[in-house]
Image: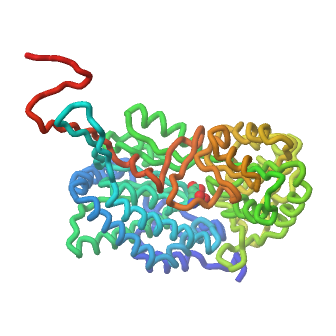
Amino acid sequence: MTISTLDLAAETKKLLSELGVEAARYTGGSLRVASPITGKEIGLLKEHSVADAKKAIDEAHKAFAEWRAVPAPKRGELVRLLGEELRAAKLALGRLVSIEVGKITSEGLGEVQEMIDICDFAVGLSRQLYGLTIATERSEHRMMESWHPLGVVGIISAFNFPVAVWSWNAALALVCGNSTVWKPSEKTPLTALAVQALFEKALKRFVAEGGQAPANLSTLLIGGRDVGEVLVDHPKVPLVSATGSTAMGRAVGPRLSQRFARAILELGGNNAAIICPTADLDLTLRGVAFSSMGTAGQRCTTLRRLFVHESVYDKLVPRLQKAYGSVTIGNPLENGTLVGPLIDKAAFEKMQSALSEAKSAGGKVTGGERVENGAAGAFYVRPALVEMPSQTGPVEHETFAPILYVMKYTDFDEVLKLHNAVPQGLSSSIFTNDMREAETFVSARGSDCGIANVNLGPSGAEIGGAFGGEKETGGGRESGSDAWKAYMRRTTNTINYGKTLPLAQGVKFDV
Ligand code: UN1
């Protein structure tokens, strides 16, 4: 079937109904959603007002007051049920992600798998919210830390991982005893409606099984910037986790710190890979191809800068050019497609202007042109490989599109400096079989990013590790490891079980 004859509005309707969303939620509203696959409308959503957003936060705050009293392993049971709902809905939700974002089928399903994985992780965590017991200098005293629920957690997510990023935050926030209020991207609210319906289903089962859960534990706000701003400025929201551009983070960060609220910021990346003389070039080719062209270059972790040692440059770069020239671009719902559409026209225009800047800076561009396939409002492109004489101009910025800037290097220490010389610090990788290079790259004087990999690309992280980056990437950490601590407040408790009152530091104060 050609793209222009696909009826995605009908399929979206069918999927949403299967996922438990009523048609009234996505018809007759003012927020128009189009599928990037066809460029055609698939939903018209009703938007929440600023007043609705304030009310939702007040309600969420009441829910928090009850939920924090439920024992953490019981809270975990709700997240376990959410994981079960997601397992049962994986095919439908994965397909909806593909339709709304334009991801290829395996990536749409992979996004839902990422949600299931974080639910499993959070369930285990619900019995492991440990504090320390610390040696005290006073006799007959005990000192310990406790971790307590924090409050309403605001979640602002981007179009490119429209549901997984919610789950990284919500699964942890919920087992940690918080309520959540979610504002998804205006470009991808349909998948958010579906996830909300699945959450409500899990909640119903939880209550039917005798679980204690308040209403409004997890709520969804559909709307634009004004609604997001309510989350950012509201005194009853002690933590906002926001994923998006560095420009967004620059606006959100200071507003949160102004009122001493916490921020988890996941902002732009400008991720690089260094290809060393001993790299396994077959493996490198596959790692680079997936990281740079996968998801049509629209991951925060997408590979955007490639430094290739001069001794392997002429072996690797022609092979990469061949892969760029032959990769299957088109309908992401079809088997065999590897590169789907860009999210919209604005993304296409930004890509074109980055490419013309690169040309003016001396770049040699292969690919990057629009691939026409009869769908006027959809934007398919051939991924672009740009050989650059140096790291200048557009190479220093994140363009959310499949552009890979390739640069030749000679000296390892020099390339490490170049690697770290951009303002962003999300993800990074090195391809080498030289143990000194590999270890140096992951050492303190190596990559300055939050994620540093050896012999795999910078994208496609699993949920068990903490996810996030440094510098203009914002410093936040989500998902695995001890990222849960950001969703709780720590108290230090000292308990005197003796009959005297020794003071710390030997202070005497006898009255
Ligand atoms: C993002 O692009 O916002 O590591 C997140 C990855 C995915 C998550 C990306 N697991 O590429």
Q: Is residue 187 positioned above or below 140 on the image?
A: below
Q: Residue drawn at (86%, 43%), measured in percent from left and top?
A: 410
Judged left or right of residue 409, residue 244 is left
Is residue 401 among what the camera can see? yes
Judged left or right of residue 511, residue 143 is right
Furthest toward the right, the residue is 314
Which residue is nearer to you in this view: 61 or 324?
Answer: 324
Furthest toward the front, the residue is 139
Total label count?
A: 0
Which residue is nearer to you in this view: 1 or 418?
Answer: 418
Q: Which quarter of the frame holds ligand 1?
A: bottom right
Q: Residue drawn at (36%, 70%), measured in percent from left and top?
A: 80
How far from the left and from the top, in percent, is residue 211? 22, 69
Q: Is residue 17 positioned above or below 237 on the image?
A: below
How far from the left and from the top, in percent, is residue 325? 85, 66
The image's colouring method is rainbow
Q: Residue drawn at (74%, 37%), measured in percent from left and top?
A: 417
Q: Quadrant of the N terminus?
A: bottom right
How far from the left and from the top, in percent, is residue 61? 27, 50
Is residue 304 among what the camera can see? no
Judged left or right of residue 138, residue 405 is right
Q: Quadrant of the C terminus?
A: top left
Q: Residue drawn at (28%, 75%), measured in percent from left and top?
A: 205
How far from the left and from the top, in percent, is residue 100? 57, 67
Which residue is nearer to you in this view: 454 or 148?
Answer: 454
